[in-house]
Amino acid sequence: MGSVGGGRSGHVSQSHGSHASSSSLRWRRKNSDEVCFCGLKTVIKKSGTRENPDRLFHACPRYRKGSHCNYFRWAEDDDYEGLENLGEVKTNAQMESDAALLNHNISWRMMTLEAEVKALRMQLYFGLIFVIVVFMIMCMFFSGK
């Protein structure tokens, strides 16, 4: 509900990746009973300031809705525990196979685009020749009178 990465469920999604693997981890708050001064369960928000970019904080669920209690507390790294590995891990061989397939698709697309450009150039040349011939015929027709 308005919180980044999980709202009232207390879940925050976070991705970890490298050139050898692609996976995502789901994180859960250890203490999910934190309440604001209104007595409501806090939500997790992500900071957008230059001083604390993407840093998580606890806030009143009514934050930015007019009537809120101004509850604020930075979420510490030890407030969360890793739950499970949700994504698939790709081996180097799988990634190389994917890259080869992408290269093949790109090469095929380049060849079709080059053929299309060649055909359009030919149409342009024939159109230009047609215009020149018509112009010459008109010049001969009007200069003869």
Image (cartoon, helix red, strand yellow):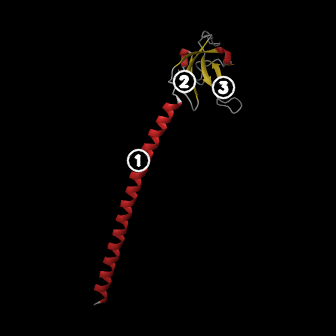
Q: Nearer the viewer, mark 1 or mark 2?
A: 1
Q: Outermost residue toward the right? A: 51
Q: Distance between the residues labelled 2 and 3?
A: 18 Å
Query: Of the residues shown, which amino acid type is indicated by label 2?
Result: Ser
Where disc 1 sits, the SS reads helix
In which quadrant is the C terminus drawn? bottom left
* Towards the viewer: 107 or 72: 107
N-terminal of the pair, mark 2 or mark 3, is 2
Q: Can residue 72 be seen in this view?
A: no
* Residue under label 2: 24
Q: In this view, does 108 lie above or below 49?
A: below
Q: Which residue is drawn at 38% across and 56% down?
A: 115
Q: Quickly name the residue at label 1.
A: 108
In the rendered structure, the answer to whether residue 50 lies left or right of residue 131 reads: right
Residue for point 41% across, 52% down: 111
Question: How far from the left and from the top, in percent, is residue 129?
Answer: 34, 73
Mark 1 to mark 2 CA distance (whole Å): 33 Å
Q: In this view, does 54 lie above or below 99?
A: above
- Pointer 1 and pointer 2: residues touching (CB < 8 Å)? no
Q: Which of marks 1 and 3 is nearer the N terminus?
A: 3
> Which residue is disc 3 drawn over?
55
Gap in Å between the C-alphas at discs 1 and 3? Answer: 44 Å
Residue 121 picture location, percent across and down: 39, 63
Neighbor class of circle 1 (other Cα within 10 Å; few <14, some 14-19, many 20+) is few
Q: Which mark is residue 90?
A: none
Residue 31 position by quadrant:
top right
Could you tell whether 119 is left or right of 96 in the image?
A: left
* Disc 3 secondary structure class: loop
N-term mark: 1 or 2: 2
Q: Nearer the viewer, residue 90 or 2?
A: 90
- Kind of residue indicated by mark 1: Trp
